[in-house]
Image (spheres, rainbow, N blue to C red):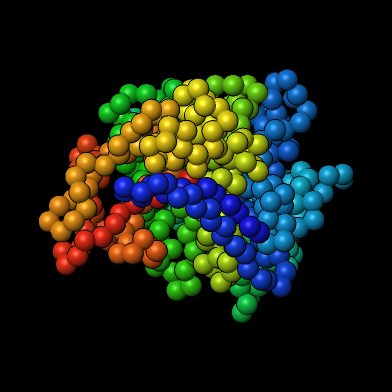
Amino acid sequence: MIRNRPIVSLLKNWAAIPIFASVLTGYLHAAPLRVLAIGDSMTEEYAFELTFSAPDSDPDNANVRNWPELFRIFRPTDLDMGAYRTGIPYGDLRTLGHRYNFGIPGTTTTNWTNLINGAWEDDPLGPLYSVTKNAIEEEIFNTPVVVIMLGANDLKQEYNDIFNNTEDPAFFDNIITRINFIHSWVRAIRGVKPPKVVVCTVPDVGATPQISNIYNVPEKKVTTRAKIAAFNQKIIAWAASKQNPPVVARLDLLTDRVFDQVPFQINGTVFTLSGSNENSPTQVFCKDGFHASTVAQAYIANEVIASLNTAMGTTIPKFSDREILKNLLGLNPDQPYLTWISSAGLPSSGMDADPDGDGLPNLVEYLLGTSPGNYSNPFAGSFSPGASLSWKPDAVGLRFGDLIAEESNDLVAWTTVPAERTSVATDGTVSVVPPTERKSFVRLKAVAKP
């Protein structure tokens, strides 16, 4: 696969030189990696979760996808979750979908331990526990790796008590005990040749609009988040303590990003958390305000892929941000730049163009926050021993791309200015100093984020 992204550069006292880079990525492998999943509604195919996955205007067809669906659609030669059934139901707790996908909506770690133990009294799912357990035990012999993605419903059910600090003191530890039990069962099924296992941390459901709109006392939000973060650290510590440790997929990093990145954005494309019953591609959560939308599921998929690579020694490519925007969401990954250049009255001017003739290509101007239609001087100072050059990037522009300072002795060979000669002030101003022993040239290279 060949992916192209624009690179343009600015040379101090010289004209801009456009550069385009093509990066060849890929790898060779014998067959798709078979993956079995144990999970809840985040894992069951969204095609069968129409109450939140279908837009109000078309309630019979989902317009968001989750991680097993993304694997099938966008990584079919890398990952295999089994044949995709659309006709006769399986006859167990699954509906339809992938053969190796045991995502059962609404289930908690308690449901899964009951399933394994055959304890189904007073459990509405219980009558199908036995047949579901048998199906899993059969399919594990066909799959070298199992992903366990559970716990979000445990947190959701008890969130009121967690938020108000009235949860059972053993609540979080009990979840880990049950995850440990499920992990041990999965490994024991195949006897002396157990599958590799990926265990996921638990997303902080307090980041979802459905929960945060109700539980919104600032001080309690802070303490609740801290408790759930500590719980996830305990999962990581538990995994590391095992004789044959599972690989941990850090799903909690996604909800950390929802909490901390305001606004939530990918390469300058800004997302809302929720708000539209049409499941807009620029929403992080589905119309119910709880389930992860396609964009969030793409990052879940990336965490799972990274963990599968660690567990199995594979090199399956994760979804790049530009791939997420373009292929998964149907958006133009260059839209932030296009909006900016259009607002300057130059809608057809490319990233490497220099319409004002100041030696700064448009992409450099965008990242510096200068005008593409008026002459600008981006540098202050000089690049000679004992001096420095400074510039102040635009924070919004830097969402879209990176400015890289490069130096050269002969204007032919260019290298990145080392970090030890680069500093960033508290206001964002970047300064670089030259080598102490010689004069040299410096340029800024602007690169759109991958």
Q: Relative to the observer, which residue lies in front, 283 or 248?
A: 283
Q: Quadrant of the N terminus?
A: bottom right
289 is higher (above) or lower (below) than 242: above
Q: Which residue of the protein is positioned furthest toward the left in this rendering?
A: 386
Q: Is residue 120 visible?
A: no
Residue 162 percent across, percent down from the top left: 38, 35
Residue 201 percent across, percent down from the top left: 46, 51
Q: Residue at x 71, y 73 (%)?
A: 30
Q: Is residue 396 visible?
A: yes
Residue 403 percent across, percent down from the top left: 37, 47
372 is higher (above) or lower (below) than 105: above
Q: Residue at x 33, y 64 (%)?
A: 410
Rendering quarter of residue 169: top left
Please give left or right for residue 335 compared with residue 241 in the image. Answer: right
Rendering quarter of residue 33: bottom right
Q: Residue at x 56, y 60 (%)?
A: 23
Q: Residue at x 74, y 64 (%)?
A: 138
215 is higher (above) or lower (below) than 49: above
Rendering quarter of residue 225: top left
Residue 261 percent across, percent down from the top left: 39, 36
Q: Relative to the observer, which residue lies in front, 107 or 402?
A: 402
Number of numbered tags placed on the structure image: 0
